[in-house]
Image (cartoon, rainbow, N blue to C red):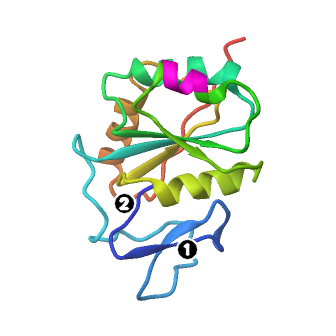
């Protein structure tokens, strides 16, 4: 999800996950968001934050964070939003990705609220949301950046989900 300049977070605009909307005009009702020149440029220098909502997911965090560490183009920021876990999630995060941000919520607010908390804390131009049990393929983030370059008019990307079991 791209965070446009001159915009604010409007949760009501796109269901439970919200959407960034321009402050100065009403949100379009069309399926596609028109190109906004105030949006950050897409390219190799785009700042990308990965947000991972978590609730008692210590067993999932290690492979998820390790898959992010294997990226040829790592994200500039990783935020793990914890919904009041009682397991060893924080310890796993510190061992596997000590540079990641731990954002505790104190209680289980649910997936959407955790994503919203992560987006509010994110510094990136783009935000990628991953489930804590996700392992991204090598080159995943490079592929996302390439997709953003091919479609600069897009406001978001979705990835193909594969089950390798």
Q: Secondary structure at mark 2?
A: loop
- The residue at the far top in this view is 165
User: Residue at horizontal 43%, vertical 18%?
Assistant: 138
Quarter of the rendering containing residue 131: top right
| Magenta stretch: helix, strand or loop mostly | helix
Please determine whether, in this image, residue 41 is positioned above or below residue 131. Answer: below
Please determine whether, in this image, residue 77 is positioned above or below residue 162. Answer: below
In this image, 146 relative to 49: left or right?
A: left
Please determine whether, in this image, residue 150 is positioned above or below residue 30. Answer: above
User: Residue at horizontal 48%, vertical 53%?
Assistant: 156
Choose the circle earlier in sequence order: 1 or 2. Answer: 1
Q: Nearer the viewer, residue 94 or 42?
A: 94
Say whether marks 1 and 2 touch (CB < 8 Å).
no
Q: Is residue 18 magenta?
A: no
Q: Position of residue 141 (x, y in %)?
A: 39, 32
Q: Position of residue 45 (x, y in %)?
A: 22, 44
Q: Circle 2 is placed at which residue position?
A: 153
Q: Position of residue 112 (x, y in %)?
A: 69, 54
Q: Nearer the viewer, residue 135 or 27?
A: 135
Mark 2: few, some, or many residues within 10 Å (few <14, many ≥20)? some
In this image, 41 relative to 26: left or right?
A: left
In this image, 44 relative to 110: left or right?
A: left
Q: Which residues are magenta?
A: 91-95
Q: Which mark is residue 30?
A: 1
Mark 1: few, some, or many residues within 10 Å (few <14, many ≥20)? few
Q: Position of residue 52 (x, y in %)?
A: 58, 39
Q: Secondary structure at mark 1?
A: loop
Name the quarter where the C terminus is drawn: top right
Q: Which mark is residue 59?
A: none
**How far, Cα to Cα, is label 1 from label 2?**
14 Å
Quarter of the rendering containing residue 143: top left
């Amino acid at each position: 999800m791209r965070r446009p300049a001159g915009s604010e977070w409007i949760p009501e605009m796109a269901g439970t996950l919200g959407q960034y909307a321009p402050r100065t005009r009403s949100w379009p009702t069309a399926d596609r968001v028109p190109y906004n020149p105030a949006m950050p440029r897409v390219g190799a220098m785009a700042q990308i934050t990965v947000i991972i909502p978590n609730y008692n997911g210590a067993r999932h965090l290690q492979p998820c964070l390790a898959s992010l560490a294997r990226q040829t183009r790592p994200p500039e920021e990783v935020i793990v939003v914890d919904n009041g876990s009682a397991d060893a999630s924080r310890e796993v995060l510190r061992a596997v990705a000590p540079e990641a941000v731990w954002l505790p919520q104190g209680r289980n607010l649910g997936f959407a609220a955790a994503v919203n908390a992560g987006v509010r804390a994110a510094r990136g131009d783009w935000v990628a949301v991953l489930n804590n049990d996700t392992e991204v393929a090598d080159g995943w983030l490079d592929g996302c950046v390439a997709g953003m370059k091919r479609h600069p008019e897009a406001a978001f990307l979705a990835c193909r989900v594969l089950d390798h079991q």
